[in-house]
Image (cartoon, rainbow, N blue to C red):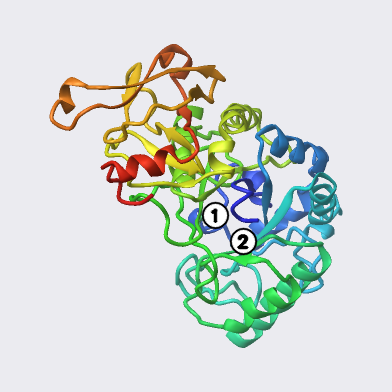
């Protein structure tokens, strides 16, 4: 399943949307806990619509949604019984997680839940200046690790019981504690769920954040995450948005390495995904929809060719050539592969491309190799080209027998 759902929407939403600065404003701006928490009495996101958020998911061609149920500020976005610091106690009073889980089920979109280990509200949580902890406990708090673990356990149990089937559980900020029973309980309540590596044990998948790791193919399940803007995950009034081309190229690298990609938006305090973010999702989605078969149906095939501009994925006798740095010229080569494909198609446009096996001047000693030509540079200016190369069944294996020596076939 993880391999078939490759692209998801990450949503950071909470009280911090009111300030419109950053999801960690309480800590980074040293806002007194009481002032920050009082914002809940002004939280009235009347424009929230699970169906509109899911429209954004579908427009982007995404297959899953990951929602922040509790960020570091401790404010709970579901109707938890563990605290009153929750969305159902705001003037708005609704349970967005219930609405989202229903809408996901209706549209066959998988649901993943984010839960932060640090907590700047729970009186039992530890706030002694550790990783993403407040520098000191809030007045009146009584930090107690055992009680806090009970609090987390109760909440995780609610999340895994009351909101239908969950595909993934995204812990955040590893607490530096090994408590295997947490993940065991999540698996007991949600058989088949995958759990990330930021919680109380190693988990099932890695979570590189805001960067593309080096290397040819991931050696363990991986879900990279990035936001549409560079400054914040939560809503930010003055966000500096990434160009769709930058995001597409990063995504393509991650996909070609076999990873999944979680792209984040921060809805504002009315519950609306900002129009700039929505526009980015549309543009990125157009690329994903057209090139999806090279991601979802194919597996990474690093080492088949020597050209570092090209990353390959493969499905049987089809190779997909990804150019994640963009089209830097009208043609590219796949040395030392010297097999003529039956057909070459630019997935971005659906147009056929020329492909031929010929001797290139720079490889005069190596011999002929496959060259693909006719990339329309004007149409590929802000994107990552992906070319589908269909070979006769068995032709690639035969080439290997005749001296094509890729590292892996
Ligand atoms: C980092 C940030 C946090 C954000 C997360 C998303 O851990 O501290 O605010 O939620 O990344 O992966």
Which residue shows up at 78% across the image and 62% down it? 165
In the drawing, does residue 179 fall left or right of residue 271?
left
* Label 1 SS: loop
User: Measured along the vertical axis of the image, is residue 401 above or below residue 348?
Assistant: below
Label 2 beta carbon less than 8 Å to ligand 1: no
Label 1 beta carbon less than 8 Å to ligand 1: yes
Check disc 1: other Cα within 10 Å, few if <14, some if 14-19, many if 20+.
some
Q: Nearer the viewer, residue 250 or 115?
A: 250
Work out which residue is located at the far bottom of the displayed protein and give it.
Answer: 146
Which residue shows up at 56% across the image and 29% down it? 287
Which residue shows up at 48% across the image and 35% down it? 247
- Counting every numbered tag in the picture gives 2
Tell me how far mark 1 sits from mark 2, CA to CA. 7 Å
User: Measured along the vertical axis of the image, is residue 59 above or below residue 27?
Assistant: above
* Label 2 SS: loop
Decide if residue 138 is in sight here: yes
| Disc 2: which residue | 73
Residue 192: x, y in percent? Answer: 69, 67
Decide if residue 49 is in sight here: no
Quarter of the image containing the N terminus? bottom right
- For residue 157, what is the image quadrant? bottom right
| Disc 1: which residue | 24
- For residue 131, what is the image quadrant? bottom left
User: Measured along the vertical axis of the image, is residue 383 above or below residue 376?
Assistant: below
Residue 38: x, y in percent? Answer: 72, 57
**Mark 1 and 2 residues: CB-CB less than 8 Å, in contact?**
yes
Residue 9: x, y in percent? Answer: 64, 45
Q: Nearer the viewer, residue 107 or 43?
A: 107
In the drawing, does residue 333 fall left or right of residue 391?
left
Which residue shows up at 78% across the image and 36% down it? 52
Mark closest to the chain's N terminus, 1 or 2: 1
Residue 214: x, y in percent? Answer: 33, 50
């Amino acid at each position: 399943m993880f391999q078939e759902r490759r692209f998801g929407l990450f949503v950071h939403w909470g009280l911090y949307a009111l300030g419109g600065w950053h999801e960690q404003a309480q800590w980074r701006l040293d806002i007194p806990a009481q002032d920050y928490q009082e914002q809940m009495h002004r939280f009235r996101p009347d424009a929230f619509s699970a169906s509109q958020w899911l429209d954004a998911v579908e427009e982007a061609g995404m297959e899953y949604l990951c929602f922040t149920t509790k960020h570091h500020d401790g404010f709970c976005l579901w109707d938890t019984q563990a605290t009153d610091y929750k969305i159902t106690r705001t003037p708005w009073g609704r349970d967005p997680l219930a609405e989202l889980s229903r809408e996901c089920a209706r549209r066959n979109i998988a649901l993943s839940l984010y839960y932060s280990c640090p907590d700047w509200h729970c009186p039992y949580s530890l706030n002694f200046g550790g990783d993403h902890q407040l520098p000191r406990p809030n007045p009146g708090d009584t930090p107690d690790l055992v009680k806090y673990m009970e609090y987390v356990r109760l909440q995780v149990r609610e999340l895994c019981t009351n909101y239908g089937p969950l595909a993934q559980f995204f812990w955040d900020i590893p607490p530096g504690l090994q408590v295997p029973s947490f993940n065991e309980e999540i698996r007991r309540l949600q058989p088949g769920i995958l759990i990330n590596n930021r919680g109380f044990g190693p988990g099932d998948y890695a979570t590189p954040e805001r960067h593309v790791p080096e290397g040819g193919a991931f050696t363990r399940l991986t879900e990279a995450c990035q936001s549409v803007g560079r400054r914040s995950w939560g809503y930010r009034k003055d966000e500096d948005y990434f160009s769709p081309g930058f995001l597409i190229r990063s995504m393509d690298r991650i996909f070609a390495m076999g990873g999944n990609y979680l792209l984040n938006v921060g809805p504002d305090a009315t519950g609306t995904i900002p129009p700039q973010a929505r526009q980015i999702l549309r543009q990125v989605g157009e690329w994903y929809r057209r090139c999806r078969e090279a991601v979802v149906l194919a597996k990474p095939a690093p080492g088949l060719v020597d050209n570092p501009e090209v990353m390959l994925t493969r499905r049987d006798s089809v190779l997909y050539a990804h150019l994640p740095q963009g089209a830097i010229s009208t043609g590219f080569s796949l040395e030392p592969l010297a097999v003529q494909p039956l057909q070459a198609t630019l997935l971005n446009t659906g147009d056929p491309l020329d492909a031929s096996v010929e001797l290139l001047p720079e490889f005069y000693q190596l011999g002929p190799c496959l060259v693909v030509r006719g990339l329309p540079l004007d149409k590929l200016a802000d994107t990552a080209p992906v070319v589908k190369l269909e070979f006769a069944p068995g032709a690639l294996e035969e080439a290997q027998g005749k001296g094509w020596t890729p590292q892996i076939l």
